[in-house]
Amino acid sequence: MVLRDVERVFTTGRGRRTKRIEALAGLTLRVQPGEVVAVVGPSGCGKTTLLELVCGLQAPDAGAVEAAPAVLMPQRDLLLPWMDALDNAGLARRVAGASREEARVAARPLFAAFGLEGFEEQRPAALSGGMRQRVAFLRTLLAGKPVLCLDEPFGALDALTRAEMQAWLACALATDPRTTLLVTHDVEEALLLADRVAVLSSRPGRVVAELEVPAPRPRRATDSALVALREQAMEALWAG
């Protein structure tokens, strides 16, 4: 995946009140196949816009975006309350043209693999926040795209559940490797999950630093290498 000198501009208002807002300017980023890259930056710096460009939901105003087919997992799980967990997970297959039964057959084996066995017939209201996020992630995987774009997937969870889900996601990406862009406000989360961290400036967003994260996983936030990288990331954020 390559983003080269990407610019994205939005306009609001009309006539003399027209306002031009630069979301991204001169953003360049390369992601290798199978690599997990976390994108961190201040609010409003264009992180979500970046994911939508990779997924083809927006087009750049300048520059180029070259990426394999990608699927977006938004911040909220967006599970349909009238469907059970199995149908929610298989929804991407239904959208692609599969029958309900075909989608359920494809989704069912993943429930055991990702710690959801026994909850296939439960509706979202009966699931914990972490379980709902797992179902949403399975729905994303079942879209069958080689590139995953994850937009603050754990932002709405409490601290304990978030820590559990970070460990779970690390295992999930090891089990089913994909090229992954993970947007997060949490530098520590980025360092725990990613192979590389791209730090964006304030608006208009551009990459101001890239940090290689030492393998292997699992990692602990107290690892000396991660503590040093966290300081570098925070300095880049403050400077940007």
Image (spheres, helix red, strand yellow):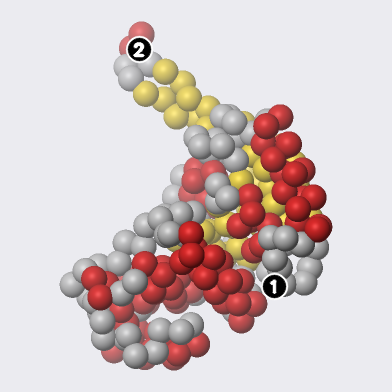
Q: Is residue 55 visible?
A: yes
CB-based contact (under 8 Å), mark 2 and mark 1? no
Sort mark 1 into few (<14), some (14-19) or many (20+) by Cα contacts within 10 Å: few
Sort mark 2 into few (<14), some (14-19) or many (20+) by Cα contacts within 10 Å: few
Mark carried by residue 218: 1
* Coordinates of residue 171 in the picture (x, y in percent): 60, 77
* Coordinates of residue 192 in the picture (x, y in percent): 66, 62
Q: Which residue is mark 2?
A: 17
Residue shown at 55%/74% (left/top)?
Answer: 168
Specify the quadrant that holds the C terminus: top right
Residue shown at 41%/25% (left/top)?
Answer: 11
User: On screen, 178 above or below 106?
Assistant: above
User: On screen, 62 above or below 58?
Assistant: above
Determine whether, in the image, residue 147 is placed left or right of residue 123. right
Q: Tag 2: residue type?
A: Arg
Q: Tag 1: residue type?
A: Pro
Number of the front mark, 2 or 1: 1
* Coordinates of residue 13 in the picture (x, y in percent): 33, 20
Residue shown at 60%/34% (left/top)?
Answer: 205
Q: Quadrant of residue 36?
A: bottom right
